[in-house]
Image (cartoon, rainbow, N blue to C red):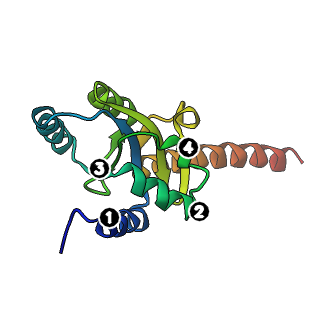
Amino acid sequence: MDFNSKDYQNAKLKNFFKTNGFFFWFHSAKLDLNQWIYTEQKLKKLKLNYSKGLNGITLKLFTNSIYKNISPIVCSFVLFINPNFKTTELRLDSIKKDLKPSFELISVKVDNKIYSTSQLKGLNDFSYKKTVFNLYNSLDQHLKTSYIVTKKNNISK
């Protein structure tokens, strides 16, 4: 099997989009071999996987899919980066800072929805467990306060 053929690259990219519900899109500069090896080592240290999409194949895939409105942002070398493990806590600030010299974040895909960097301004963490824990704490606090308020109203009647 020819791993460099366009059909294989297209199937690989389609499979990546179907199987991964969460990943980052980065624009990247073309790097020489030594710079790319250093970048791969940095990605492994951050516990991240990557997939490179060829420009023409990526554009063709987007124009024939539900992501056809996204195709204008693919204008150069595009890299798709996803976490190795589901339990890995990702900090958006640190990922941007570590990959800043050669990569520029353009969007994030979360469950068939694509969010631009401007939509992610207030978001720093990508941790499901932490988000659910914060939601539970806020619900618990609001339920306690509503219970206290309703209990005082029942006593005064």
Residue displayed at 72% across by 46% down: 146
Q: Amino acid at mark 1?
A: Lys
Residue labelled with disc 1: 6
Residue 10 vs residue 49, the one in the foreground: 10
Q: CA distance from mark 1 to mark 3?
A: 33 Å
Q: Secondary structure at mark 4?
A: helix
Please state if 121 lies on the left or on the right of 43 as rendered.
right
* Mark closest to the chain's N terminus, 1 or 3: 1
Q: CA distance from mark 2 to mark 3?
A: 29 Å
Q: Which mark is residue 88?
A: 3
Asked if the residue under mark 1 is in contact with the one under mark 2, i.e. CB atoms within 8 Å, the reply is no
Please state if 102 lies on the left or on the right of 2 as rendered.
right
Number of the front mark, 4 or 1: 1
Q: Secondary structure at mark 3?
A: loop
Please state if 76 lies on the left or on the right of 67 as rendered.
left
Q: CA distance from mark 4 to mark 3?
A: 31 Å
Residue displayed at 83% across by 45% down: 153
